[in-house]
Image: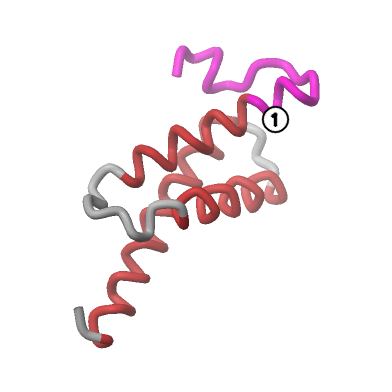
Amino acid sequence: MTVLHEPVRDTARADWIAGVAEKLALREGRHDMARDMEIMHWCREAATRFTDARIQAFVPVLVERIVGDRIRRDRIGRGCAPAVMERAGR
């Protein structure tokens, strides 16, 4: 891969990460900008685990599951009520 292709790859990566983060934030239903940014951070963090994965097609699904689990653990740890996504049967 040449250097010319890197910005496109980074842009595409940023787009799907933002999409996954938005999807998870909407499922949670809190409409809290700080929480949305936290979810975005968790998605970026989880995505870095797969930067060298040979097959990238499944990475968004893996990131969504990793961060979704983290959201559930965080809510349980804080003693919060089930999130909208959990009540909806996810």
Three-letter amino acid code at disc 1? Asp
Side (left or right) of 18 relative to 81: left
Q: Position of residue 68 (x, y in %)?
A: 52, 32
Side (left or right) of 52 relative to 83: left
Q: Residue at x 65, y 16 (%)?
A: 82
Split into 4 quadrants, where in the image is the C terminus? top left
Query: Is residue 39 something that shows in the picture?
Result: yes
Looking at this view, is 57 or 15 the one in front? 57
Q: What span is in magenta?
A: 73-90
79 lies above or below 10: above
Q: Residue at x 43, y 42 (%)?
A: 63
Split into 4 quadrants, where in the image is the N terminus? bottom left
Name which quarter of the figure residue 4 lies in. bottom left
Q: Residues within 10 Å of mark 1 (few under 14, many from 20)?
A: few
Is 5 in the magenta?
Answer: no
Residue bearing the label numbered 1: 74
Is 84 in the magenta?
Answer: yes
Q: Position of residue 7 (x, y in %)?
A: 33, 79
